[in-house]
Amino acid sequence: MSSSSDQVYKPLPTATSIRVLLLAPGERDDSKISCSLLPSDLDWDHGKFPDSTPYPVESLSFATVGRAGDDDDDGSESTFPIHVDMDFDTGPKARMHPFQRYEALSYVWGDPSDPQHIFFDGVVPFPVTRNLYAALRSLRLPHSGRRLWIDALCMDQSNYEEKKVQLGLMKRVYQQAEKVIAYVPLGGQDQKNISELVPKIFRAGRMYGEERDEREKAGSVPGHYSGPLNSISERETARVATSESEPLSVTLANASRDEKLYLEAFGLPPVDSPLWDSWRRLFTSPYFRRIWIAQEVSLGNNLHICFGDGAGVGAAEPLFLAHHFLDLHSAAMNMSYNAAWCKSEDEEESEGTLRDRVVGSANALTMFRERILVQGGRPRRRLIETLATVNHFGATDLRDKVYALLGWTSDGASFTQHVNYAPWNSIERTFATFAKAFIDRGEGIEVLLQAGYRDEEDGWPSWVPHWHNLEISAPQQAGRGPGKASTRIQVDEGSQALSIPATILDDVEVVNDLVFEKLQVTLGGLSITAFIRTMVRAFLMIFKAFSPRDPEEIFEQLFHVLAQPKTRFDKSEQRDLSRSSPSQDGNDDALDSSRKPKDSSATESQKSEGEDEPDDEETKILRTGFHEFLNYLIMLQSQLSDLEDGMAHLTQHKWRVEYQTFLRRAMATTSHRVLCVTKAGYIGIAPKRTRRGDTVALFEGCDIHFVLRRVEGGPRGINPGEEGGDGGGTATYRLMGPAFFHVPESGGARSPARAVDRITIV
């Protein structure tokens, strides 16, 4: 590409200039595409800066290019009409306006290994991916030129310095475009089906709203049917209505028998309609799984969509709104309409395709909701916050998992100096640079909440997050205020070691042998069997480790570890492990009827004066669901030796809404973690690679526990002369990740906390 780039790209005149593509006209069956480039200065946009820039007058002009790639090329030229912006305020002779209005293309690059060729100025061949080639043919007008901004063509991709500057302008490029066109190619019949389906969803939504208003006036506020796990974790697989024990047809049948309100009651097409097949194919598109697309959709001015050749360009908002309506008001909670077990066509489909579709659909909801916030002028999240929320979006260049967020985060402009696309700038180096920049800004604790050691990447500093593939998000309570920012975190010059004030609290004694992984999206439905099996195994481990011990105390710890209710964090701000130690009383039996938990009202009535205030409504629901879950485990104690039988009973039961609420919360708090117990007897959820002998610590400026692993014979820290817990300099650890350990309000002996001024993390 370098030889082509040298002929195509001229230096841009100003730091705020971009290039606009002039796409020559052509008939649909004409395979040859010709174009040219002209500069456009974003600072001269009269629409944005009316008081300081001249008014542009759109004038019909003519552009001339060579005949693109003719086999019998005789040097002849082609002239075509093009609308350009002129400036008549500068004197008697008009000139081309410094800012040329344009439409911006939002698309997936595709595979660059099998390119097609277009022609700049009719004579310079230039490789493009097949997807971009198809987009250009779809958007090309038959009789006049078109002005477009396309990243692959308007930026010199071989010039790393130019890319760095242009990336800093991305936000403005999409906000100042006259129109942003999302290119999501579909087949002809799918285009027709989507065009038919979206108005049906809108009509159902309008009727739903009218009926809801009537019921509210009459004093009857409709509720929602709560099928099994209609909504799981917002940060995990996605929202899916069906489990392996309830197909979608049963979900909808249950909804139709009650008096509650759903879109299905207002004329949505039946589940086996071919319209839903097209809907499913739409969200299988890689368009909804790319990180750059998220920025383009959220920031883009006047968002439109093009479904491919012959489809034309139409407003995208109706599609996203229809998707949003299904998610909010459908008995199937939207995602089931994307599931393979609902499809009407007899076609083979892999579980990978299903996962792509479910993730794509969930990402589309994320994009649209982010767009609502951005376009509505709501405050945007900081970069470090946003990095924890985009794990399901992919990127060809993994550095873009960070770079692509700079335009749509509140502080992204402060980080553009760290953008570097040079080949020698590795993913590890890029992420370490950004991690250090966050630390320098006082956001070090938030970096550590996203970090953790990976066995397979020994050379990666454990305090640097794997932002291209985060395994866990910060514990739930961290999002509610992790505490003051630590200003005493230091990183060495080589960005390999980090020094931080810490208190070493306790060591891990017992770890469950099964990891709580994501729910499994399968062709047969959403599988919760593996999750329940892990939960049962963890409970058995806990009771074995605590035998003998007061079972009520164990149940209370388990509830707070798995549910992590908001009131617990808000009122107590999570005490450290040196505060108390539980009693040693109890009996020897593990998980039997004598350990049946009291109901929540009994538990509350027995609280002594001076303890926690009564549970709020959310905590009451979670506690009720937790007790129901435990009661079923106890009922199934005879089956627990045969886990498969126990699992079948658990997953086939019709659960109350309180149980489902608790289970959803437990799935969110435990994902990619293990249940464990410390030497002092505290139960916690820790990173999945935690093992016996690992250390639990608190860092300055954070109320969240972290798990560390001692590095024997490692470096003695950044400041080896400082006093530490071992008396000879700072001890060295690897960071395994954030954890959550519950410490009861009352207790006796103190845990063996070891005060350490500083530790080093490598």
Image: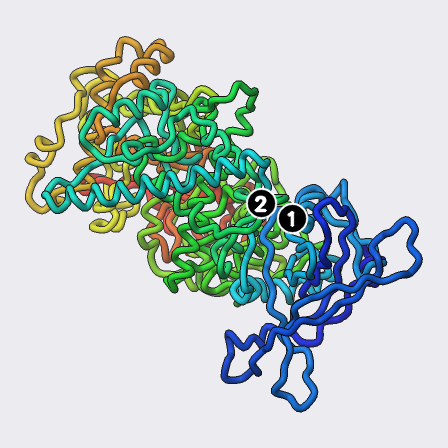
Q: Name the amino acid, label 1.
A: Ser
Q: Is residue 126 left or right of residue 134?
A: right
- For the residue carrying disc 2, how many other residues have a C-alpha within 10 Å: few (<14), some (14-19), or many (20+)? some
Contact (CB < 8 A) between labels 2 and 1?
Answer: yes
Question: What residue is pinned by disc 1?
Answer: 138
Secondary structure of the residue carrying tag 2 is loop
The percent coordinates of residue 748 (x first, y second) are 19, 39
Is any atom of residue 714 visible in this view? Answer: no
Q: Name the amino acid, label 2.
A: Ala
Q: Is residue 207 left or right of residue 687?
A: left
Q: Is residue 247 left or right of residue 301?
A: left
Query: Is residue 41 depicted above or below 363 in this figure?
Result: below
The image quarter in which residue 515 lies: top left
Q: Earlier in the sequence, mark 2 or mark 1?
A: 1
Query: Is residue 265 depicted above or below 177 in this figure?
Result: above
Q: Nearer the viewer, residue 10 or 645?
A: 10
Residue 311 image label: 2
Q: How many marks?
A: 2
Residue at left 39%, top 56%? 372
Residue at left 20%, top 37%? 223
Give the colouring mode of the picture.
rainbow
Residue at left 24%, top 38%? 581
Q: Nearer the viewer, residue 372 or 322?
A: 322
The percent coordinates of residue 449 (x first, y second) are 43, 49
Q: CA distance from mark 2 to mark 1?
A: 8 Å
